[in-house]
Amino acid sequence: MSTEQNFLDVKIMGREYRIACAPEERTALQSAVELVDAKMRDIAQRTKNTIAERVAVMAALNIAHEHLSGQSGRALEETVDTSDAKRRIGDMGARLDGVLTTQQPLGL
């Protein structure tokens, strides 16, 4: 396995970063990058601040506050596409229903 596969190149607020990442964690990391990028762009636009370090600290504080105050679930639902997970859960439910309907009831 190439060591290149252990890195992910991402872009946050127009700046490129290479981040160490196991292949199985790429999707989750990409979702995190999208969340951070969106939060930083929103803060930069609202505050008219273009100093990346300051915007990053403000974004980190906002994300931590949302997480600690229980708003993180809503924020993540708005930025992460959950349709694939919902589809897979629905498929599993359908398979279980199919298996269970062919079973004989227990004579208890």
Image (tube, rainbow, N blue to C red):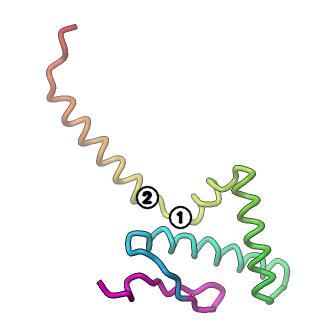
User: Does 37 lie within the magenta span?
Assistant: no
Q: Image quadrant of residue 1?
A: bottom left
Name the residue rendered at 19%, 29% in the picture: 101
| Identity, as a three-letter code, of the amino acid under mark 1 | Val
Horizontally, residue 100 falls left or right of residue 80, namely left
Name the residue rendered at 73%, 76% in the picture: 42
Q: Name the residue under label 1.
A: 80
| Identity, as a three-letter code, of the amino acid under mark 2 | Ser
The stretch in magenta equals 1-17
Give above or below for 79 relative to 38. Answer: above
User: Does 10 lie within the magenta span?
Assistant: yes
Expressed as whole percent of the image width and height from the top left, the position of residue 4 reads 39, 89
Q: Image quadrant of residue 52?
A: bottom right
Q: Name the residue under label 2.
A: 83
69, 24: nearer the viewer: 24
65, 79: nearer the viewer: 65
Name the residue rendered at 45%, 84% in the picture: 7
